[in-house]
Image (spheres, rainbow, N blue to C red):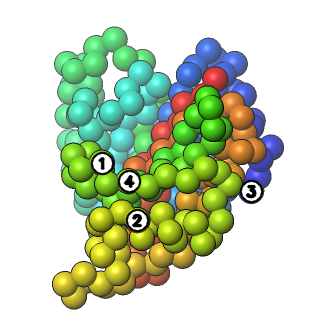
Amino acid sequence: MDTRAIEKIVKEALSLGRKNLVEPEAKAVIGHASIPVPAHRVVKDVADAIEAAKEINYPVALKVVSVDILHKSDAGGVALNIKDDKELEIRWSQMILEMADEMPLSVIEGFLVEEMAPSGTEVIIGGIRDEQFGPAVMFGLGGVAVELLKDVSFRLAPVTKEEAFAMMAEVKSFPLLTGYRGSTYKDLDAIANAIIKVGEILIQVSSIKELEINPLVVYERGAVAVDARAIIS
């Protein structure tokens, strides 16, 4: 893990008086901890967006980058499965108008053009810094399992590989990762790696107060962090 590079990202954000990292910064943090992220570029205008999409290869996702917008989807700041230049121009224009309507006071720093990750099983991995117990890591499956059922598990950091596997097995939705009703087995080692790395980040970089990967999309082989956020101080 490149702790120095992570600390530099956080220090630069703090120097601007910010309390959270925007998505590209949060992805850079987890990337420096060897958690895979999709290919992406931050752009300022639609011409750069088209150039980035051609480099990355369609289909791509387009996301707003703003320190003022934590929940991009709710504000209309995410467009998925963009297939060509024309669609990218249309979705770009729609997003600009929607942002002006939904979040008129938000400062938009740019837009993220990102490789569309193939569909897989979505999980959530979070890191928190408890005042009494210190850094802890949370695991759950994505969607309603976490949002409605609170089907999650926790461990104090550092988390061993054995503990990471135990965290997965504790959630009621665990069979979705292990071939439930004919589905494919998912790469539990890739999930365990991400759990362990999130714990290591919180231990090594005290200025990161919270870190969330939501979702980590898991496949038969490998996993990729499609979205990430971090709170700093």
User: Is residue 154 left or right of 147 when viewed as pictured?
Assistant: right
Q: In the rendered view, would you say 50 is above or below 103?
A: below
Q: Position of residue 31 (x, y in %)?
A: 62, 55
Q: Where is residue 147 in the image (x, y as percent from the top left)?
A: 26, 45
Please, what is the three-letter code of the amino acid marked with disc 2?
Answer: Glu
Local secondary structure at mark 1: loop
State the CA–CA distance, disc 2 to disc 3: 28 Å
The residue under label 1 is 150
Going 36% across and 63% down the picture, which residue do you hit?
171
User: Is residue 190 left or right of 81 when viewed as pictured?
Assistant: right
State the CA–CA distance, disc 4 to disc 1: 6 Å
The residue under label 3 is 1
Q: Where is residue 144 in the image (x, y as percent from the top left)?
A: 22, 52
Please, what is the three-letter code of the amino acid marked with disc 1?
Answer: Lys
Please, what is the three-letter code of the amino acid marked with disc 4?
Answer: Val
Q: Choose mark 2 or mark 3, whichever is in front.
A: 2
Q: Residue 152 carries which label?
A: 4
Disc 2 vs disc 3: Cβ atoms closer than 8 Å?
Answer: no
State the CA–CA distance, disc 4 to disc 3: 26 Å
Of the pair 1 and 109, the residue shown nearer to us: 1
Q: In the rendered view, would you say 211 is above or below 95?
A: below
User: Is residue 77 left or right of 55 when viewed as pictured?
Assistant: left
Q: Which of marks 4 and 3 is nearer the N terminus?
A: 3
Instruction: Classify mark 4: residues with Cα within 10 Å, few (<14), some (14-19) or many (20+).
Output: many
Disc 4 vs disc 1: Cβ atoms closer than 8 Å?
Answer: yes
Q: Earlier in the sequence, mark 3 or mark 1?
A: 3
Q: Where is residue 204 in the image (x, y as percent from the top left)?
A: 75, 44
Disc 4 vs disc 3: Cβ atoms closer than 8 Å?
Answer: no
Q: Earlier in the sequence, mark 2 or mark 4?
A: 4
Of the pair 111 and 188, the residue shown nearer to us: 188
Going 29% across and 66% down the picture, which residue do you hit?
173
